Amino acid sequence: MVIDLETCTGCQACTTACAMENNRLPGENWQDVLFYSEGEYPNLNLSWLPRPCMQCENPSCVSVCPTKATYKDEGTGIVLVDWNKCIGCKYCMVACPYGVRFYMDEAPAVEPDVRAEFPASGRRSWNPPFKMPDEYEDASKGIGIQPKGVVSKCTFCYHKVSQAPAGVADLDEDNPETKEFTPACVRVCAPKSRFFGDLDNPDSHVNALIAEKGGVRLKEETGNKPQVYYLSGGGSPAVPGNRSRRS
Amino acid sequence: TSAEAQAAKTPNTVVTKNICHQCPARCGIDVYTTDGRVHAIYGTADHPISNGKLCPKGPLGIYVLYDPDRWRGPMKRTNPNKGRNEDPGFVPVTWDEALQTVADRLNGLRERGESHRAAMLYGRGWGASCAGLLGTFGGLYGSPNMPIGHSSMCSDGSIVAKGYTDGNASYNSHDYRNCNYLLMFGVGFLEAFRPYNNNMQMWGYMRGRKTPKTRVTAVDVHVNTTLAAADRGLLIRPGTDGALALAIAHVILTEGLWERSFVGDFADRQNRFVAGQTVTAAVAPEPVINAETGEATSPEITGEGFVEKWVTGLVDWWNIELKDRTVEWASEITDIPARDILATAREFGSTRPAMAIFERGAHSHTNGIYNGMAIHSLNALVGSLFAKGGMAYQMGPSYGPMPADANEFKDDWANNGDWKTQPRVDKKGSSDGYLLARNMMQEIGPNHLAGDPYKLDTVIFYQNNAIFTAPNGQVWEEAMKDVFIVDTSPFPTETGHYADIILPDHTYLERYQDSPTYPFEGYPLTQLRVPAIKPIYDTKYFGDVIIELGKRMNGPMADYYRALDSAENVLRHLAKGFETDPGDNGVNSWESWVEKGVWYKKPYFWQQRDGVFFEWDGTDYNREMTPEEVGQKLLKTPSGKFEFRSAALEANSDWIVGATGRDPANLMFPIWEPPVHPGGGDLYFVTPKVALHAEGRGHNIPMVIAHLQPTVGGRGEAFVEINPVTASARGISDGDRVRISSDAGSIEARCRVYAGVRPDTLVLPMEYGHWASGRWSKAVPTEHCGEATVNQSDRITGQAMYYSTKVQVAKA
């Protein structure tokens, strides 16, 4: 995934679309937008950073998981959580450098608690009337209503992208052929600041964007090798993503 | 296709077309329903406004549908006492009883010759099948107060300012795709300016992919996402936007940057606009008559005078006002450094096409009419009106006729009744009220309380929660106690808390409803809501409520409503217009409208190019228009030109002088007039709408509450933004609960010390403080900014000045 910060408007549509598509609790955002401000009046710099799961090539959450509940899906490279195996120990939440994993049984971000308004039976934490279609739910991949006592995370809308025809370089919401397979956060993005494609496919648009507009990854020093790249402009050097070749 | 592949995975999924209801933008949406559950909303791909995208509100429409606090069906009040702390004691009734109760009330008033004491107040009207029915009802029934729109509490300031300058009392359509410079005054382009979703699509294009990249200067009172994303953000003293615009106009003229093909030029092409010095208008020489043929020819104009082309009054405006409106002068008034004003003016004046756009931030002040006229005049100076990359006006759709002609169903009372001599209760159009305004809804509460011009008896509210949204709504709380109130919201509201009868509407995902676009890109476009599921509760579409009420009225008007039959029948008749004028997407019938959700027909018909107006001839903008055609179709002023000297204002000079004390010598020009700030405080109080503000329903959506004000961390509540210097001078620390007080009232909110807000200004988003609109909003600790906002209106535009109050702030 590529996120272009030059055109991102900080509107949070990615956040709300993800939340509704994936039945997230209010404020428990798989896809958040973080806001920063620095400087003194009148020279204040207000900036923002959309933050999905980085879907690391070398994810620290996977290596620390004692039950192998968190794993990397071989076909897509997406990091998933098997809710049948997760014991809720939260090691992965500590290990994740990006803060993008969520445990369900915390105090609600918004009162009254919607879980009480839409109660569910068994391990299910709640049962909203707008729940995703039954066919999409898959506890082995962490898709659906998050059960009590487990950790969840962004799946890159696995239930959508995994349906795409094999070999497609880009999942573009503006292409009628791929619209329905595009992750929710990409699909709604009004300024078209998000792009979803196959990093292993040299023909993909995401590879071109990373090269042309100076794509960088967050916290390269961790060695996690995120598969989410940020663009902060083009035509001039961007913050380098790895060490200088001189040394 | 991908839709088919997805269908294989979820065979029970049905996609219906609808229009988002959470702001005026009218984005086409695809509503996904599976096994009876609505579970996803995405933008409609082949819809010109949404283009498959959404803003952050769009996906949350599902919450609106499934809001657990919705009304379950029609109800009547059992507790006669009304007040914030009175339980209405609502009990369920049948639709028949509820409608008959209201009809009996209206029939009784009419029999007593008091039909003017019944009113219908509406907020967001959508189209011919809802608010469009109300005027007809008022005309048949006989009330000047049916309906009264909310436009004065919305954005009439910009509409009226445009009406007085270019003759179109409307919002503009915009060609952002081809615009190279945007100058925005108090607009909130990336938060609230309509159509927000499309604005962001255009933003991504203008700022990311377009060549050349569109340059942007944004003017506001605090750093929001728009200012942060712009090339230049100017933090202006509230209410002084007109001074900034006048200085920009001054620079454009003195530096010779104006568009000569539209504005005109000095006859000898020498620029004589020099600060502090007057200029003269050219005098057209007498035509020369050929003695033999009788043919008249006009000799070329010579000399030092200015020859105007598509504008009037420029020379007088310069001599009376502009010549002294220097950058240094404006810097003092606006508190913006002179170098920034100069740089902005030079950029705006030298980049074509450029647009200056504005909304309430600029015109929601006592001088709003002049702020608006001054800003809009910049568009004339750089020739943006009807130009490619500029602004124009919206065309209407090709609707078929209604099922019946209302004029054939009028009885004697409707035609000649005494109600025709009654003023409107809001005193719109009254010389002792607001002679020139379009609506004055904010005056209804106070006027009723005073019995001036009379007491109302019955009020029907549609999409309108005036008791909460009117500035200083506490007055309405007192005023509405002795009025029989009918509320039609699907949800509990403060106004509904005062209701005697509740006639709950369907939510937008449950009803058929039409909606011609708000001004967008000019070409005609209208769209349709199609129910995604059967209504969950015992509710009724408001359009059908009006029709059913009409059928219960005495006299011939009942026959008219029997002819309409139902709102769906009305919509089917409207769609007949498409049979002879199919849309670009093939929509040519009711059925295809339901399938596609939108009818539109490009292009916009007119374009001004280098001072010449052209009309579309079927293939391109080829047919040159005569000045008479331009005046009739585009610049609809008395002169047929853009009027820096407004003939319409001048015609009302006597009333304006009497009502405002303004100077008859200059009141018709875009002039600088210092704003008046009531309230008794020392800090400006600005209460903007933010991206998640869903027109009076976001406050009860948990997902909205979790994300309302991200720029300063407003999650779970709304913070009042206060500058660090201002806070420390009052012993206020970040996170403190503070009390904000004015002459109107006082409220509490938690503060966020934020270096992005002006030291003389507090900013608190308008959203919370609801006390009867659902459990989630009631649980939010932020109180309502409207209770500390003085009810003051622009005497000309009628605009309610939500941003003109000055307040005090102290630790609570």
Image (cartoon, coloured by chain):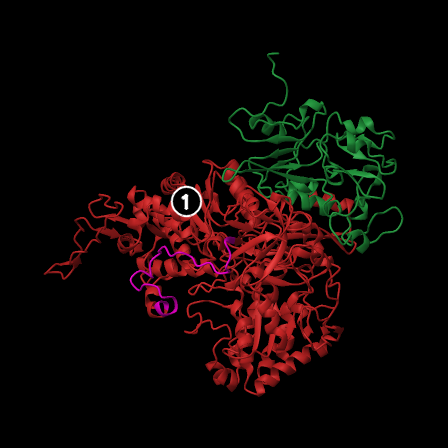
Chain colours: A green, B red
- Closest to the observer, A113 or B620: A113
Give x and y (percent) for residue A189: 62, 42
Is B663 colored magenta in this rendering? yes
Q: Which residue of the protein is positioned furthest toward the top in this rendering? A: A247
Rendered image quadrant of residue A244: top right
Looking at the picture, which amino acid does disc 1 mark? Ala
Rendered image quadrant of residue B558: bottom right
Give the left or right position of residue B521, taking residue A184 as reference: left
- Closest to the observer, B43 or B293: B43
Give the left or right position of residue B429, taking residue B106 as reference: left
Q: Which residue of the protein is positioned furthest toward the right in this rendering? A: A122
Q: How many tags in the picture?
A: 1
* Mark 1 neighbour class, 10 Å CA radius: few under 14, some 14 to 19, many 20 or more: many
Give x and y (percent) for residue A104: 81, 43
Give x and y (percent) for residue B647: 32, 63
Magenta span: predominant SS is loop
- Closest to the observer, B612 or B767: B767
In the image, residue B331 sits, relative to residue B596, either above or below, namely: above
Is A25 colored magenta in this rendering? no
Give x and y (percent) for residue B640: 33, 60
Residue at image point 35% right, 58% down: B630
Rendered image quadrant of residue B728: top right
Residue at image point 72% right, 45% down: A27
Magenta stretch in the rendered image: B656-684
Instruction: Provide the residue designation for mark 1.
Output: B354
Quadrant (top left/top right/bottom left/bottom right) for the C terminus of chain A = top right
Q: Regarding mark 1 in the picture, which secondary structure is present there?
A: strand
Q: Which residue of the protein is positioned furthest toward the bottom in this rendering? A: B112
Residue B643 seen from this side: yes
- Closest to the observer, B39 or B581: B39
Give the left or right position of residue B253, taking residue B417 as reference: left
